[in-house]
Amino acid sequence: LRIAVLASGRGTNLKALMTAIDAGRLNARIVGVFSDRASAGALALAGEAAIAAVSLSPRNYDTRAAYDEALFSRIDDVQPDLIVCAGYMRLLSEHEVQARRGRMINIHPSLLPAFKGLHTHRQALDAGVATHGASVHFVTPELDGGPVIAQAGVPVLAGDDEQTLAARVLGREHPLLVDTVRLLADGRITLGSTGVQLDDVVL
Ligand code: GRF
């Protein structure tokens, strides 16, 4: 499976995929890493692993549509089977998303549909929930609104702050993302007309 990764930050989810592939735990190949931030750690990780690393600055484009057209033109150059958004902080154009329905996933640090958008750990703490976590979902034009594929839960502990809760969630994101991409690579998960199709998968 050819994977393109979109990331804006450190890239710990990207690293988790790279590590799993290198360890023979994921039969896939990362064919490109793309970012809106030249300083993203994810690009450095890609460079160190001789993976194509591309950053496009939104400042160089007049509209979101123009930016996304340039970005997806570069993504199409590496011909991915799957696009993984992992810590990518820009909304994707409806046109580009619809054209790749079922081939784009995102990992979001909350138990969707709860706490969409940013600062999810602050949202969880403010809401006083006992359980928080992460979700992998197919990308649709609605921000963090696509069909959920898999989730991982963590307890919210007394004394937690955003940092401690984020760290606990992040630790569960990595195996969740690897396991979900493996199911996609094995063709055992698809996005059907009525939503996520699992062929008797026990997550
Ligand atoms: C993670 O919590 C991810 O879920 C969110 O961005 C955070 C950083 O991800 N989207 P990474 O360390 O850059 O992979």
Image: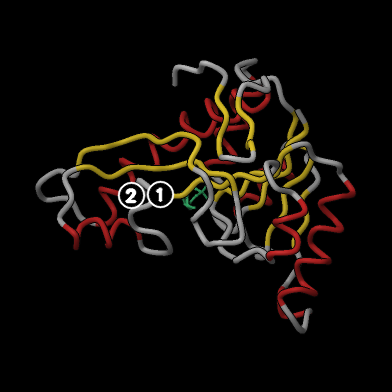
Q: Residue furthest bottom?
A: 62
Q: Is mark 1 within 8 Å of ligand 1?
A: yes
Mark 2 is on which residue type? Ala
Relative to 170, 67 lies left or right = right
Q: Quadrant of the C terminus?
A: top left
Relative to 149, 24 lies left or right = right
**Which colour style is shown?**
secondary structure
Q: CA distance from mark 2 to mark 1?
A: 8 Å
Q: Decide: marks 2, 1 in contact (CB < 8 A)?
A: yes
Residue 182, image quadrant? top right
Q: Which residue is mark 2?
A: 166
| Viewer-nearest residue: 166 or 149 | 149
Q: Quadrant of the N terminus?
A: top right
| Viewer-nearest residue: 100 or 79 | 100
**Label 1 neighbour load within 10 Å: few <14, some 14-19, many 20+:** many
Q: Which residue is mark 1?
A: 109
Mark 1 is on which residue type? Pro
Q: Earlier in the sequence, mark 2 or mark 1?
A: 1
